[in-house]
Image (cartoon, rainbow, N blue to C red):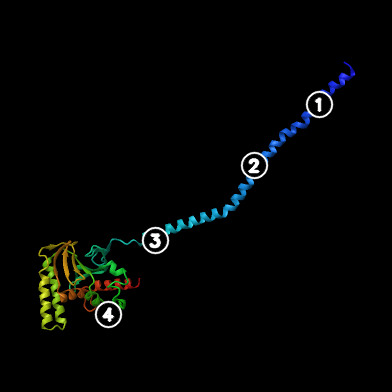
Amino acid sequence: MSATRWNRARTLLAQPTRTHAVFRPVAIRAPIQHHLGRTAAITTVAARTQDRWRPWMMASVATAGVLSWQLSQSLVESESQVQPATVIDEDSKVEFPRTIPSEDGSPARLLGLGVRKITFLKVQVYVVGLYAKESDLDDHNSRFRALPEVQKFQRTDSASSDTAFRAIVQNPIELVLRIAPVRNTNGPHLRDGFTRNLTQAIKHQNLNDIENEEAMKGIIEFKNLFPKGKIQAGQAMLFRKSPDGSMSIELDGEVLGTTRNSWLIETFFLGYLQGENPISGKARDSIAKGIQDLLLQ
């Protein structure tokens, strides 16, 4: 081989080695830098987005936690405010329903109750409780709550409380006296006890001849409304004063009869509500406390 050909061959053999030494790093390095740059950019944007929304996310989590706590507290409070369906007389242990149906079917709520005892023997005869319609008790503009005498009611002032009780009975307000015997008895036995109280009331009232005659008619009519059979412990008689001025007597949901004698109705109810010698002092005190607590709400 001539010198000229040898030189040309050596030049061609040397060229590929120099070309790969320069090109290869460039061909490999460029794609890596490109992808790394995109990844870094995406990571940066994501980090900035998280930083921007992190306070809002934290606030949302905190708000949800507060609302959850408030809801749980309200549920606990509502459960603690649920009252039992019955009230137990502390002396006789007789249970009374907290509410009973009124004439129109709406609930009437118990204001107070107490046991009636035969004084000299201390024998428990029956438990008596007074009910009034819930709508009358809860509505500040009702006939019950709006009475000036009721608004001035003072439990510890017998004159004030007597005036209020008389106004409640004399006005067209539905009231119910529920009477439940402590032990087995019968209609005539309960009737005789009620009529003795009414007869005693006549002696303490300054009635003229016409009023006295009206009172006696009312007592006779009242006696004829009572059942002649047995009344078991656990049964109850209802004496319902209607806004129309009448009073019905019921036993176990059955209406035994009705009277419209105003003297009889007023005297019968006030016998349990008057401050001086009430038929049941425990019932009178409990009812007075119930009204006082109502007015403080």
In this rendering, is residue 279 above or below 8?
below
Whole-angstrom CA distance, mark 4 to mark 1, is 128 Å
Query: Going by the image, does 54 lie left or right of 193?
Result: right
Label 3 amino acid?
A: Glu
Residue at x 11% of width, y 78% of height: 214
What's the residue at 72%, 33% (across, down)? 27
Residue of label 3: 77
| Residue density around tag 2, few if under 14, some if 14–19, many if 20 or more, within 10 Å | few
Residue projecting furthest to the top: 1
- Lateral position of residue 116 relative to residue 210, left or right: right
Name the residue beneath numbered marker 2. Answer: 39
Give the vertical position of 261 relative to 88 (above or below): below
Across and down, in percent, residue 271 comes to 20, 75
In which quadrant will I find the N terminus? top right
Q: Decide if residue 45 is on the left or right side of residue 220.
A: right
For label 2, the SS is helix
Counting residues from the start of the chain, the first of labels 4 and 2 encountered is 2
Residue 15 is marked as 1
Does any portion of residue 217 appear in the rendered image? yes
Camera-side mark, 3 or 1: 1
Which of disc 2 and disc 3 is earlier in sequence? 2
In this figure, which residue is indicated by the disc labeled 4? Answer: 158
Q: Between disc 4 and disc 1, whose residue precedes?
A: 1
How far apart, in angstroms, are the residues tagged by discs 3 and 4?
37 Å
Q: Which numbered disc, 2 or 1, marks the residue that appears first in the sequence?
A: 1
Tell me if label 3 and label 1 are in contact, CB under 8 Å.
no
* For residue 36, side relative to residue 5 (left or right): left
Viewer-nearest of discs 3 and 2: 2
